[in-house]
Image (cartoon, helix red, strand yellow):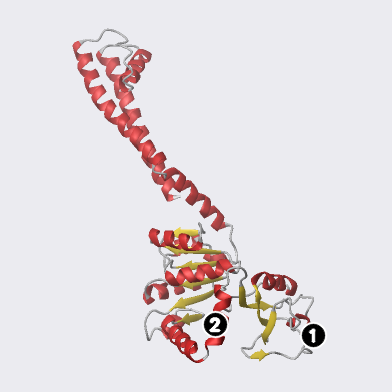
Amino acid sequence: MQELARMRDRLLSVAGLLATCTVLGVLGYRFIEGWPILDALYMTVITLGTVGYGETHPLSTQGRLFTIFLIMGGIGLVTYGLSTVTAILVEGELSEALRRRRMEKDIAKLSGHYVVCGAGHTGGVICAELSKTGREFVVVDRDREAIARLAERLGGEFPHLLGDGTDDDVLRKAGVERAAGVFAVLSTDQDNAFLVLSARVLNPRARVLACQKSLGVREKLLRSGADGVVDPEFIGGLRLASEMIRPITVGFLDSMLREKETHVRFDEVTVASDSPLVGRPISEVKGAEGGGPLLVAVVQAGTDRYEINPPASRPVLAGDRLVMIGETEALAAMRRRVGREPDHLIA
């Protein structure tokens, strides 16, 4: 929208200068030569257009001097106007502005999506995972080159905004008030803390996760309103240790992330209160026979306790969160069957 406004202002300034030059030409011929308005306008237009049709009426010495200055000024203005229009068309400014406006309209239609603030390496990993699992997202970053690199990584254009993720107006344009979650993965802990505060105020219902960049700030980020804080170095250390002492298990998890033909994930499915499975035995969703997502654990509503491999006779309760593993399409089908989208991503 701002790009279109800037182009409009540039074109209006060019049009204003040309109109002013035309009016001055008409008035000059009118008062110097005493010509009728139409003759003065015709002479002014052919002079500015340098078409060489000849003088409308014989010119006096004063008229010829005026014409010289009109030609010199007019050629400059016409050249400037043509170069401005050419730059807008040839350099792609108009098409880029229209594309941005179309994207902003598409973003305005999103609901229940994820806002990823930061298009760096961590943000790219998040976006790739959201894309693979069928989640809609919007990326916010002020670095145009970072957005371009991420587009190349994802294999095409994606919804994004160029702007500061700590700016409330930018977050509103990204649809944070309708978002299911916000990822704060900016370059500094201070920026992430400001972002968490803004997102929490704009959408208290959204799940907000922050990336910790340095030691000792976890509690501060949590006090800022983050639902969770992730320390990449801590996780990296755990991963190195796991790679050393349990390589087969780590290899299994890696295979889920690296498989290109199918996308297998751990995910969360929440049981709606009006789900047809409420009261039915958990065996109907366990998937132990194969062909569907496999139930790994259940977290009962209002608790944080994991029931690992619950008994087949356990009844399904409203609000149960089912931790399952399976292909993303099968998990999506399970969510439709159970009757509610997940509150957030598990892994």
The dot on residue 186 is: none
Position of residue 5 relative to residue 189, above or below, is above
Q: Position of residue 55 (x, y in %)?
A: 29, 11
Residue corresponding to mark 1 = 281
Which residue reaches farthest top?
Answer: 58
Please rate how many residues cluster around mark 2, counting C-alpha atoms within 10 Å: few if below 14, some from 14 to 19, many from 20: few
Residue depth check, mark 2 versus mark 1: number of the one nearer the observer: 2
**Do callouts 2 and 1 mark residues in contact (Cβ within 8 Å)?**
no
Indicate the quadrant where residue 92 lies.
top left
Identified by mark 1, the residue type is Pro
C-alpha separation, residue under disc 2 versus residue under disc 1: 33 Å
Labels 2 and 1: the sequence-earlier one: 2
State the SS at label 1. loop
Q: Position of residue 25 (x, y in %)?
A: 30, 21
Q: Position of residue 171 (x, y in %)?
A: 47, 64
Of residues 164 and 292, the one drawn nearer to the viewer in this rendering? 292
* Left or right for 106, reference 77: right
The count of marks equals 2
Identified by mark 2, the residue type is Gly
Please rate how many residues cluster around mark 1, counting C-alpha atoms within 10 Å: few if below 14, some from 14 to 19, many from 20: some
Q: Is residue 12 visible?
A: no
Q: Quadrant of the C terminus?
A: bottom right
State the SS at label 2. helix
* Left or right for 210, reference 332: left
| Residue occupying image coordinates x 31% and y 22% | 48
Of residues 304 and 257, the one drawn nearer to the viewer in this rendering? 257
Q: Position of residue 113 (x, y in %)?
A: 57, 66
* Left or right for 11, reference 290: left
Position of residue 347 relative to residue 249, above or below, is above
Indicate the quadrant where residue 29 lies.
top left
Residue corresponding to mark 2 = 251
Q: Is residue 168 visible?
A: yes
